Image (cartoon, rainbow, N blue to C red):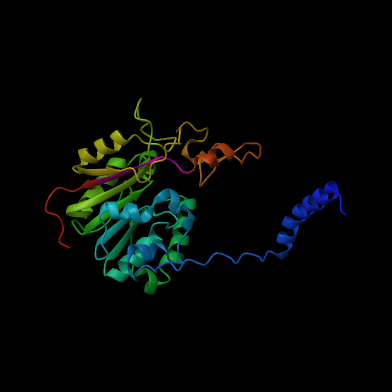
Amino acid sequence: MTSAPFRRRAVLAGLAAAPLAACGDEKPKPPPPKLDLPTPPLGSLEWAAAGPWRLDPERDAWRHPVETLKFFGIRANMSVIEVLPGRGWYTAILAPFLAQGGGALTVATFDRTQATEAQLTALKGFEARFLSDPKLYGAITMSAIGPKVAAIAPDGSADLAIVMRNIHTFMAEGYLEVALKLIFRALKPGGVLGVEEHRARSTGLQDPRAATGYVQEAFVRSIAQDVGFEFGGSSEINANPKDTKDHPFGVWTLPPVLRTAPLGMAPNPDFDSRPYAAIGESDRMTLKFIKPGAAPKS
């Protein structure tokens, strides 16, 4: 006859072995099913933003291009001016969208007669990318903006002009008011100027050259209204409350640049960019201004 202690040991051993046996018999779980997300309609703003031709689409989490352009009131049949496009981050959305919808895109870039070698090199890269595929990007009109430029487009020809993170560029080069007057002239009555810009603290004086890259929102609104624009509203879609705006190398200390030394100096390998990468991209104002007069017809 089996003793009680022996029976208890046998039961405990069986209980201990049961999970091991279950693990050995367990079948691997199938991978989760892929979500069959709907494809954005051809020609929509969402379609243009989802295209494989995009530049750095991972930045959408910080720049919210679809929501920003909708806030500005963009429509596919509009005549749009993009001012100082850089590498063409927004161009890669605007150009296909407008090409599909019967709109028109004018790009006002640096005045070649005044541009630096770096600016000319960037301009060549832009043209190589966006002027070589008219089927996708449409027939983009190239123009220039600068203190010696007479016009960026025919007077009263554009429905919308956008200046994305370049107000500080105009300030650094000393022609912000001239630039805004050129844009004002190019817009139709009722046309919209959309601005996205690194937002400075509201206290203290605005550096007229915006050396840190940050600009006070009240300053932008004041200059635009001095030129003749009416304030049309603001959005917090591109705000980042984590941005303290007091970085050692200005706004360029943050992503996507992550500068580690003053401009013109070699990168500092000992500088720790991790705290700035954790902040993310800058806090930005998103503003809409309107040229007085009748709104353009749809």
In the rendered image, is residue 263 in sight?
Answer: no
What main secondary structure does the magenta stretch of the protein show? Answer: strand
Please identify the quarter of the rendering in which residue 235 is found: top left
Q: As drawn, which residue projects farthest toward the bottom?
A: 135
Q: Nearer the viewer, residue 202 or 280?
A: 280
Residue 135: % across, % down: 38, 74
**Left or right, residue 30 beside residue 209:** right
The quarter in which the N terminus is drawn is bottom right
Q: Point out residue 32 in the picture as x, y percentages from the top left corner.
A: 55, 64
Q: Is residue 242 on the magenta stretch?
A: no
Q: Give the vertical position of 97 relative to 206 (above or below).
A: below
Furthest-top residue in this view: 204
Residue 87 in view:
yes
Q: In this image, 268 relative to 192: left or right?
A: right
**Can you tell which quarter of the image residue 215 is in?**
top left
Give the quadrant of the C terminus.
Answer: bottom left
Q: Which residues are magenta?
A: 281-288
Identify the residue at image location x=41%, y=72%.
133
In this view, 37 is above or below 72: below
The residue at the far front in this view is 1
Q: Give coordinates of residue 241: x percent, y percent.
A: 42, 36
Front residue of this view, candidates 189 and 288:
288
In the rendered view, would you say 75 is above or below 63? Answer: below
Left/right placement of residue 280 relative to residue 238 reads right
User: Which residue extends farthest left?
Assistant: 294
On the image, the x and y values in percent for residue 219 come to 29, 34
Q: Nearer the viewer, residue 232 or 235?
A: 235
Q: Is residue 144 above or below residue 238?
A: below
Q: How many marks?
A: 0
Looking at the rendering, which quadrant does residue 106 occupy?
A: bottom left
